Image (cartoon, rainbow, N blue to C red):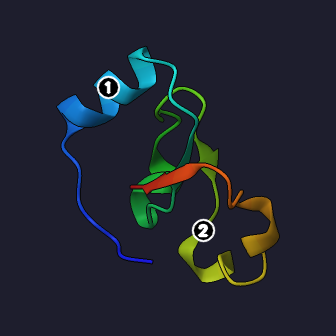
Amino acid sequence: MEARRITVEELKRKMDAGEPLFILDVRGLSWDESNEQIPGSHRIRLSQLADRSREIPTDHEVVAY
């Protein structure tokens, strides 16, 4: 599987179109400092990603930020 970057505009277009996305919030320190997040995103700390990988669907496009 190849990772690629998408723009904010492309993400918004995909969300507005109702595409099946799993939006993953892996921010570090800013994660603790902010309750702001993309609507519908899932917060998993990068340090916990391996332990919680079962929570990430394989049948959706995954967008991490």
What residue is drawn where x is 48% and y is 35%? Answer: 37
Q: Which mark is residue 49?
A: none
Viewer-closest of 22 and 1: 1
Say if 29 sits above or below 17 in the image. Answer: below
Picture coordinates of residue 44, whole percent (x, y): 64, 61
Picture coordinates of residue 22, whole percent (x, y): 58, 46
Task: Pick the quarter of the image with the N terminus.
Answer: bottom left
How crowded pointer 1 is (Cα within 10 Å; few <14, some 14-19, many 20+) is rated as few
Q: Give the labeled residue for mark 1.
A: 12
Picture coordinates of residue 2, whole percent (x, y): 36, 76
Q: Which mark is residue 45?
A: 2
Q: Label 1 to label 2, Cα distance in Å?
A: 23 Å
Say if 64 sits above or below 11 in the image. Answer: below
Picture coordinates of residue 46, whole percent (x, y): 55, 75
Viewer-closest of 65 and 30: 65
Residue 38 appears in view = yes
> Badges 1 and 2: C-beta atoms under 8 Å apart?
no
Residue type, mark 1 in image: Lys
What residue is drawn where x is 58% and y is 35%? Answer: 20
Q: Nearer the viewer, mark 1 or mark 2?
A: 1
